Image (cartoon, rainbow, N blue to C red):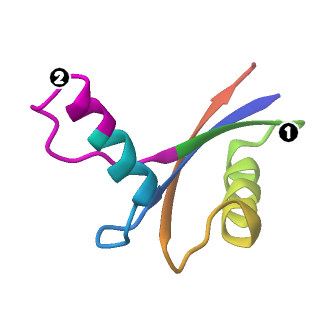
Amino acid sequence: MIKATITVKLKPGVLDPQGEAVKGTLHTLGFGEVTDLRIGKTMEVWLDADDPAQAEERVKAMCEQLLANPVIETYSFSLEEGV
């Protein structure tokens, strides 16, 4: 088994209304030192695979075809074997 931890974030310059709303709420709660905040998402995917190179290719394909929108998002991932 191989576990992939995938992080998807908006590209720099892409408007993040959810991040702006959370930043505004933090300011209201007294956390005025927050100067910027961006919201992303993290996914954990378990693969029935033994070959890390093959798992990496499969996870890349998943990200490019479904999990991330390459027009407005970037993604990164790490693999952990034996999980």
The answer to which of 15 and 8 lies nearer the viewer is 15
> How far from the left and from the top, in percent, is residue 8?
53, 53
SS type, badge 1: loop
The answer to which of 68 and 35 lies nearer the viewer is 35
Q: Name the dominant secondary structure of the magenta segment.
A: loop
Point out the residue furthest to the front here: 28
Count of labels shown? 2
Quadrant location of residue 65? bottom right
In the rendered structure, the answer to whether residue 10 lies left or right of residue 79 reads left
The residue lying at 32 percent from left, 35 percent from top is 25
Real-space Cα separation, disc 2 to disc 1, in angstroms: 47 Å
Quadrant location of residue 27? top left
- Residue under pointer 2: 30
For the record, the magenta segment spans 25-40
Callout 1 amino acid: Ala
Callout 2 amino acid: Gly
Residues at marks 2 and 1 touching, judged by CB atoms closer than 8 Å: no
The residue lying at 75 percent from left, 61 percent from top is 62
SS type, badge 2: loop
Q: Is residue 2 magenta?
A: no
The answer to which of 38 and 68 lies nearer the viewer is 38
> How far from the left and from the top, in percent, is residue 61?
73, 66
Quadrant location of residue 6? top right
Q: In the rendered structure, which disc, 2 or 1, sits on the residue that comes first in sequence?
A: 2
The residue lying at 67 percent from left, 61 percent from top is 63
Q: Is residue 39 magenta?
A: yes
- Residue under pointer 1: 49
